[in-house]
Amino acid sequence: MKKLFIIGLMLFTYVYSSGQEQQKTPLPPVPAGPDKMTPGMTEIWNPEVKVIQPGATDRDAPSDAIILFDGTDINKEWMGMDGKPSIWAVKDGALISTKGSGYIKTKRVFNDFQLHIEWKTPTEVNGNSQGRGNSGVYLQELYEVQVLDSYDNRTYRNGQAGSIYKQYPPLVNASKKPGEWQIYDIIYTAPRFSNDSLIYFTPPRVTVLHNGVLVQNNVSLRGPTQYIGIPEYTIKKHGPLGILLQDHGNPVGYRNIWIREL
Ligand code: MG
C-alpha cells in the first residue's frame, strides 16, 4: 500500500511539473485568420475588367464579337473546304446548305470561343431519323454538334439535335418545329497538348444551350467525331482551327452567326 502511494505521488509530481513547463513555453504567433482580415484584403481592383457593349438582346452580337455571317456575303468569312469560294446559296438572309456542294468553313481559325448560331430545318418534312434536316456545326473542324430535325423524329439519342455526335446525347430535347428558327449558343474550350504524349493532355470541353436550354454541360470530348468507330485521341496535335458547317444533303439554313474569342 505504501509502495502504491509513493508511485502515485511520483506520477502526480511529474504530470504537475509537465503542466508547469508547458505554461512557460511561449505560444506560436496566431496566423491571420478571417477574424483578423479586413474586407479590402480580398478585393482585386487592377487591371480593370474590359468593358464591352452587350447586344440589345441575347441574339445580338456584343461589341467584341466577330460577325461570321450577317445575312449578306457568304464569302467574306466562309469558303469551301478546298479554299475556293463556297457555292452554298444565300436566300432571305440565310445560308442554305446545298446538296452536293460540300462543307464550308471559316477563313479564320479559333481556339477557345463562344459561338452563337441560328439554324432552321426545312418546313416540308422529308425523310426520318438521320435523313431529316441533317447538318452540323463542327468546332475546330473536328467535333460535331449535331443539327437535325429532332421534333417528333426518333433517332439514336447521341445523334439527335443538341448531341455531340456519337459521344453525348443532349440532356433534353429542346427542339422547335420544322421550319422554325432555332439557336445554339456554344462555349468551347480547345484541347491542350503539351508534348508528344497524352500524359499532359487536356481534352476539349463543350457547353451547348439549345434555344436557351442547357443540353451539354461542359462535357469532355473523347476525340474527333467519328461516323464509324470509337472516337479517341491519338498524339496528333492540333492548333487553332475553323468552324465548319456540314452539307448532309438537306437544305438546312443558318443565320446570325457570331463568335467571341475567349
Ligand atoms: Mg450532322
Image (cartoon, rainbow, N blue to C red):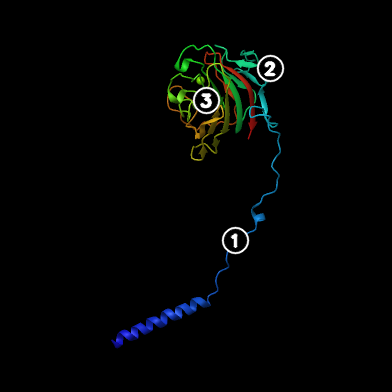
The amino acid sitting under disc 1 is Asp
The amino acid sitting under disc 2 is Asp
The reply to whether the residue tagged 3 has its Cβ within 8 angstroms of ligand 1 is yes
Horizontal and vertical percent position of residue 132: 49, 15
Query: Which of the two labelled residues, at mark 3 and mark 2, occupies the earlier sequence position?
Result: 2
The reply to whether the C-beta atoms of the residues labelled 2 and 1 are less than 8 Å apart is no
Of the numbered discs in the image, which one, if any, rests on residue 144? Answer: 3
Query: Which of the two labelled residues, at mark 1 and mark 3, occupies the earlier sequence position?
Result: 1
Which residue is identified by label 1? 35
Q: Is residue 64 above or below residue 160?
A: below
Give the camera-side residue of 68 and 52: 52
Q: CA distance from mark 3 to mark 2?
A: 24 Å
Q: CA distance from mark 2 to mark 1?
A: 61 Å
Q: CA distance from mark 1 to mark 3?
A: 51 Å
Q: Secondary structure at mark 2?
A: loop
Q: Residue furthest toward the bottom? A: 2
Circle 1 crowding by C-alpha within 10 Å: few under 14, some 14–19, many from 20? few
Q: Is residue 102 above or below residue 111?
A: above
Horizontal and vertical percent position of residue 53: 71, 34
